[in-house]
Image: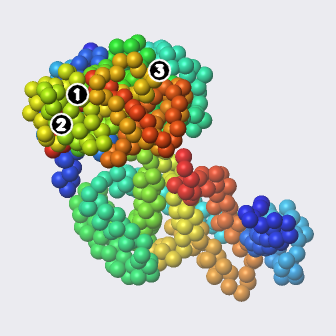
Amino acid sequence: MADVVFKHVNKLFQGGVVAVDDFNLEVHDKEFLILVGPSGCGKSTSLRMVAGLEEMTSGEISIGGKVVNDVPPKDRDIAMVFQNYALYPHMTVYKNMAFGLKLRKYPKAEIDKRVQEAANILGIQDLLDRKPKALSGGQRQRVAVGRAIVRKPKVFLFDEPLSNLDAKLRVQMRTEISKLHNRLETTMIYVTHDQLEAMTMGDRIVVMKDGKILQVDDPITLYDHPRNLFVAGFIGSPPMNFIRGRLTSEGGNLFFDEGSIKVQLDERLMTPQAQNYASQPVIFGIRPEDIHDPAETRDIRPNTLVKAKVEVIEPVGSESIWYLSSSHSTFIAKVNSHVKAEVNRDKEMVFNVSKAHLFDPATEQAIV
Amino acid sequence: MSFAGQTGLASRVGQGVVLSLLSVWLLAVTLPFVWVVLTSARSTEEIFRSPFGLPENFLDSLATNYSKAWIKSGFSNFFLNSVVVVFTSLGLLGLVACPAAYALARSRGRIYRYLLVYFLAGMMVPIQLLLVPLFFQYRDWSETLTAFLKPLFVLMGNDHWVVSLADSQPGLILLYVSLSLPFTLFVLQSFFRSLPTELYEAGLMDGCGEWRVFFSIMLPLARPGLITTGIFNFIGLWNEYFLALVFINSDQYKTLPLGLAAVSIQANYRSDFGLLFAGLVIVMFPTLVVYVMLQRWLTQGITVGALKG
């Protein structure tokens, strides 16, 4: 039972490098919160400040209502899972998991009960007598998680725990950690640079860049309503297409005009803010999955067809990724893999403008 | 054994060369040793008759030579002195060097880097240069200590007592510890440095304080390093002759190398070579035992960091 609150937290590294810049955030009790961003964005530093492994330069962090700025890590009642597992090589799996309880002077029977319980949850009952050296990467990560859960801490911290695993195992562990969260109902803060991990696991996602929080939202809101260019490009794979051009006003309608691409905006985008950008440069954002082959879609709005040359086709199974170019821009479309196209031929594509975004090129903030 | 990129004859010739070189090396190392052991079971007359012959009365000569060496020539005393001096030194060295090396490895900041360089500089000074200043230093310290403890001596009714660091086992131990410290620190700190920081952090999260992390996590993991430096120091100190020669005069404090030298010098023209060889084996034997017992750790210690995992 604990929420974690950051109040104006700053972290300056030696030499004046700003790692975390005025970080304000409230992690709710029992929430699964993801910190995501490119490397060097301050996400791990923020997590380590919660753990007490990194001192903050200024600000305040509280766990369960108690300010922990001066509380040493061992007294914060939190557990952390590290990227490289950090299992004690000289101890067996059992001892690795029991170590924290032993230090806290739990009775032997209680330690044994908790270790067995955690081992059951994680399916590592048969490994308890082994040393970490004799385990595979996935097993080691399970033990590392086990070591964290036996303590039943107030908050779990995960620092890129799946980065060292191969792709298949990563997907498997992803769902297991999600299941674990549902089962334990404890606050979890999870750091990753992988937007897919963030999207699939988190209740809420914090997107960070250069030490700053850019947006905090649930995965779908983040996907549908990115507040700026960076979030729009970071969330989603393949990333959102950004096309530079101008807004023009014709007969009461707004058009995005790039020269070779000209599409009519729908009512959703025709907000007063957008009207202000008439005849101004803007960045038009549209996700690859919102660009269709005319054969795929029944509902084609007026003035949303764009002619472009198909340059490369990458079939990835149920869908194909098409790399297209108009005379001024290139963009990517994700279409049903059964739709056929020929490389190096012009093709008409439908832009689903109802899902498009507009960004200010100077501030990079979303206009609509 | 195979050589990458070579096949057939070339590879076999290469293999042959390597094997013969290794065989020569093996013989060069083992033959003198075997000769010393065999000769220690021969009488002096036999040795003079044919230096490289085999023992004629193996058990008789063995018993005579070793009992003479152990009892009459005082090797038992030398052995005990060596054990006391060397193992106390090793113990103290571990006590001082382990925490110091850990602190040097973990601490950031310029002052610790300078401190490490300061210690390493100790490895670059030849012992011969230190002898005279050390001798005077010991004399001064002894006088200061005597003056300091005088009231206590008077109280005990022994006001003629004096403290002497030179010609004493504590003095020799102090020398051994301080002169072995640079090398030990150098090896151990690189060992501690090779241990991932995350283990330290995992320890903190599990509820350790600094000391707990050191004793429960870092020290056990540094065991190969401890054993490596332990063996190197043991071999160095067990065979150490020069410092002992300068700082120890009394027969009662002499260590094995000094004792061996004394016996061979005293014997002069009437050399009892059987006895000398027995003494030599007594000197060599513990080193061999220690090495054989701990060699598994030694190779691990030397190759640390070279291999992943």
Please name the amino acid that badge 1 sits on: Leu
Chain letter for mark 2: A
Residue at 9% in and 33% down:
A276
Name the side, left or right, on which A353 lies relative to A107.
Answer: left
Q: Nearer the viewer, mark 3 or mark 1?
A: 1
* Tally of numbered discs: 3
Q: Are marks 2 and 3 on the same chain?
A: yes
User: What residue did someone put label 2 on?
Assistant: A247
Task: Give the Cα distance between marks 3 and 1.
Answer: 43 Å
Does residue B187 show up? Answer: yes
Q: Nearer the viewer, residue B249 or B293?
A: B293
Q: Position of residue B138 (x, y in %)?
A: 34, 73
Residue A240 lies, in percent from the top left, at: 33, 35
Question: Would you place residue A350 above or below residue A245 in this image?
Answer: above
Q: Position of residue A267 (x, y in %)?
A: 19, 21
Front position in the image: B14 or A239: A239
**Tag 1 residue:** A265
Image point (54%, 50%), residue name: B308
Does the image show residue B35?
no
Query: What mark, if any, has residue A176 been given in the picture?
Result: 3
Against B72, residue A192 (above or below) is above
Cα separation between marks 2 and 3: 47 Å
Distance of mark 1 from mark 2, alpha carbons? Answer: 9 Å
**Along the polypeptide, which appears first: circle 1 or circle 2?**
2
In the image, B137 versus B259, the foreground residue is B137
Q: Are marks 2 and 3 in contact (CB under 8 Å)?
A: no
Give the quarter of the image for residue B188.
bottom left
Q: Are marks 1 and 2 in contact (CB under 8 Å)?
A: yes
Q: Chain of mark 3?
A: A
Amino acid type at image mark 3: Glu
Q: Secondary structure at mark 3?
A: helix
